[in-house]
Amino acid sequence: MNTRLRIGLGTTLLHDPATRDALDGIGVYTRELRARFDARVDVEVVPAVMRRAAALAAPPGTFSFPVHRNVMAAWSLATGRPFAGNAALARRIDVFFATDYRVPRLRKIPVCATVFDAIPLSHPEWASPRLRAVKNHVLRSTIRWADRVIAISHAMVPELVEHYAVPEERIDVTHLGVDERWFEREPDARVASLRKHYRLDRHYLLFVGTLQPRKNVATILAAFARLPPAFRSEVQLVIAGRAGWHTDGLVTALRAAENDGRVRWLDYVPAADMRALYQGASAFVFPSLYEGFGLPVLEAFAAGVPVVCSNVTSLPEVAGDAALQVDPTDVVGLASAMEALVSDDALAQRMRDRGRNRAREFTWDRCAEQTLAVLRSMV
């Protein structure tokens, strides 16, 4: 009897030229779990892709669904039939694990899907308006093809039940992890070199994330503007992240704020620079309006940076008592927390210690073990 669990793993993001060099949170999740599955003798991974560009770039042994995923989803919705390639895939795997919302309709193969949040359905105003209704219909329907669903926080469970109509008894929760490398200290010379390269002051407040409405960067700017002039003359606000959708006004505001030299918008920052960028910060600011998990908070904790974050959705679950938590709409409260973490050395050190201890509770090894337990229970 073969005791190895054969997992079909959706790896489109890891091979697609459009995403592989700048992975988002879903891409990091896929990469980290794949690495841990590959390292095990009791698991065999069959990578699978659902986009032609990814199929062309994928290594030998990768399974490629014959047609573009969006076409296959529409065809399966219309006909009730499984994706093309179902029979060939069934001979190679015991269970299929979709990590990136590309959930195939399969027959005789149990399917597990990780669903990070319900933003397209719960907050459609934050999503692209192009074909929004059609996309949301397809998304809602394809999630239901999964036999089991993994949520990345307990806060997301009622969201998935309400907006995707997934029965709660079919949902498991596995928290994300933070890689051990985030705990490693960069040499002082490396941090100093990074400051010089990006023209950063000795003290700066840091935000990291793609610019989009739910990240609430406009409130960070408003809170920073309320800080005393003497404070702002000594402390920069640094925003690291590409412009996303619905951000024309924010980009204009960022460029205007840069004129006085106290705000720096770095746009895209290479992954190789991120740990030093975090470690050089005086505090990390993350007042997001909605997070399925909030991985940047964990990365800041591990990097030894005191954190202020919002008190909504999953962030209290992730941060615990290791961050100052504020109402994300409270400009005055956010400004006060930002100032306190820079000005009060004892408070900052206390939050650093709590943060590093908190980050140790979230590991990719644990995430992988819990995920494998779910997958094994399905076969």
Image (spheres, helix red, strand yellow):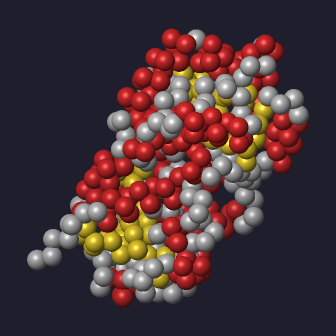
Q: Is residue 215 left or right of residue 14?
A: right
- Left or right, 192 with respect to 15, comes to right
Q: Determine if residue 234 is in view.
A: yes
Q: Position of residue 319 (x, y in %)?
A: 47, 30
Examine the rendered structure and indicate whether residue 200 appears above or below residue 109. above
Identify the image quadrant of the C terminus. bottom left
In percent of width and height, residue 355 lies at 44, 28
For residue 131, which quarter of the picture? bottom right
Residue 271 lies, with reference to residue 337, above or below; the image says below
Give the residue at x 64% y 39%.
Answer: 193
Q: Position of residue 78 (x, y in %)?
A: 56, 80
Count of numbered labels shown in the rendering: 0
Q: Given the current orientation, which residue lies at the most extreme front position? A: 189
- Whether residue 169 is visible: no
Quadrant location of the N terminus?
bottom left
Identity of the residue drawn at 15% across and 71% down? 3
- Outermost residue, left side: 1
Above or below for 379 versus 156? below
What x and y, as percent, mark residue 214?
A: 67, 42
Query: Looking at the image, which residue is at 58% across and 68% down?
Result: 138
* Whether residue 373 is situated above or below residue 98 in the rendered picture: above
The residue lying toward the viewer, choosing from 276 and 180, is 276
Q: Which residue is nearer to you in this view: 89 or 322?
A: 322
Q: Residue at x 42, y 80 (%)?
A: 62
**Residue 82: quarter of image:** bottom left
